[in-house]
Amino acid sequence: MTIQVREYATLTCDTSRETSMDLGVVSQATFDWLLELQQSWKGRADLLSIEGKTRLKLCSYAGYLQSPHGEAIEILPKTEYAIPTGPERLRRLLHTMLRSTLGLKHREAGAAELLRSRTPLHEWVIRQFLKELADLVRRGLRFDYRNVEEQCRFIRGQLDMTRQIRQTPEKATHFHVRHAEFSPQRLENRLIKTALDIAFKLTKDSDNWRLANTLSHQLVDIEPINQPLRQLGHWHHGKMMQSYSIINPWCRLLLEQLNPNFQKGKHKGIALLFPMEQLFERYLKACLRQQLAVGAKLTPQVSRRHLLSHAPDSAEDETVQNWFVLKPDFLIEQKGVCFVLDAKWKLLDQRLSTSEHKYGIKQADLYQMFAYGQKYLDGKGQLMLIYPKHNDFERPLPVFRFNDQLSLWCVPLDLYTGKLIEGDWLGSFDCFQFSAA
C-alpha cells in the first residue's frame, strides 16, 4: 500500500478520514514507527511535528518512506497551493531536480522510462544506479595491483625470509611470499558492490531485481565493505577513473541515504528523503549556470563577510574577532560588479499585495538581504530573492527599495524549464544572457 502526499501534509491513524495529497491515513503501527523515526532523525531540520495523539505533520522533505509493516509513503514537492490532480508531473519534477543536483545530464525519456517514473522514488534511484553499473561492466571495470602476503607451496614473487626462517619443521614445504596481484578489489569497485547489495536487498521491482541479480553474479568475486560511509571520501576521481564518474553520485546516494540505521533494529524500513530547501538551492545553481552571460562568475555559499567585529575585554592580545558569518546562496561577479541572490523554497502570492500580507514574504528574509547588501555590496547594488513559480506567482514583483541605491527583486523560477521569468529586473542584472523581449 502506497500513500501519496506532498510536503507539509498531515498523517493520521484515524481511518475515518478520506485520503488526499494533503492528508494521508496510515495504520497505527506505521504511525508509531514514524514517531520512533523522528526521535532518531539526524537531519538538520525535523522530519515531522506532532499534532495530537493521532496526527503528524510532515516538514519540508520530499522522498519516500516505507515502514517495516509494508506501508509506503511517497512525499512529493509542494509547488502550488491547490491540490494537484495527479502526482506524475511532480514526480518527474523531483527526478529532474535530483539529476541536476547530482550533476547529470538530462536524458530524453521514452515511453518505457516515463512508465518507470511512476514507480516509487527509491526504485527509480535503484534503476538509475543499475543502468549505469550495467554500462560500466559492459565497458570493463578498473583493476589495480594490491600487495598480497600468503603462505603457499610454491614461490611466487618475493620470499619473506624473516618469516620463512621462523617456519616450523612440519611446514617446511610451505613458503611465506609477497607478491602483487592484479585484482578487481579496488576501493571504488568494493563500494559499488556494497551499493549493489543494498539495491538487491531493497528492490521489489521485477525489472530491477532481474538486473541486480545478473550484476551480482558478474561481480561475485568483489568483496563488499562493512562500513562504506567511512570510505566514500577516498573515491579516486583521476583521469584513469573517468568512466566511474557517472555512477559515483548514484552509488553515493544509495550508500548515504539507503544504508545504515534504517535497515537495522527497531527502525528497520526505508527512508530516502531530501530537504527541499537544499534541493531547490542546488537545482537553482545548475539552472543559473545555464543562464549566465559570458564572463560572469557564479560563487555558491560565499562566506567572505561577517555581520560585526568585536574585541572582547578578556582577549589578552586585543585581537578583533569577526562574529556571525553572512553566507548568501549565490554571489555573481561580472566586470567588478557584484550581485547577491538567495533561494527561497516558499510559495509567494502576488495577489496579496497589501501592507498587511506583503505577498507572504518573511520579514526575516528581508533583514537578511539588507545585511547582505550592506556587507557584500557596500549598500549599493542589486539583490534578488528567487522563489518557485506557480499559478499565484507567475511574474516578478515590482522592485523593493531599501534606499535609492540598494534594490531588491523577487523573481519566480519556472521549475519545469529551469528558467528565471523575465521582467523589469533584467535592466539591472546584466550578468544574465536573456533577450530583451
Image: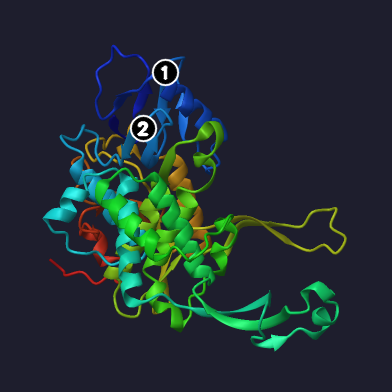
Front position in the image: 218 or 376: 218
Q: Quadrant of residue 12?
A: top left
Dots 2, 1 in contact, CB < 8 A: no
- The structure residue drawn at horizontal position 32% and vertical position 76%, both measured from the top left corner, is 139
- Residue identifier under label 2: 8
Instruction: For marks 2 and 1, give the CA distance.
Output: 20 Å
Residue at the far front: name it.
170
Q: What's under tag 1, amino acid-wise?
A: Gln
> Is residue 427 positioned above or below 151 on the image?
above
Residue 30, x across and y down, in percent = 42, 25
Residue 98 visible in the shown view: no
Q: Secondary structure at mark 1?
A: helix
Residue 283, x across and y down, in percent = 34, 57
From the image, which quarter does the C terminus lie in? bottom left
Q: Which callout, 2 or 1, points to the residue nearer the camera? A: 1
Q: Quadrant of residue 241?
A: bottom left
Residue 144, x across and y down, in percent = 52, 80
Residue 7 visible in the shown view: yes
Q: Earlier in the sequence, mark 2 or mark 1?
A: 2
- Residue identifier under label 1: 28
Q: What's under tag 2, amino acid-wise?
A: Tyr
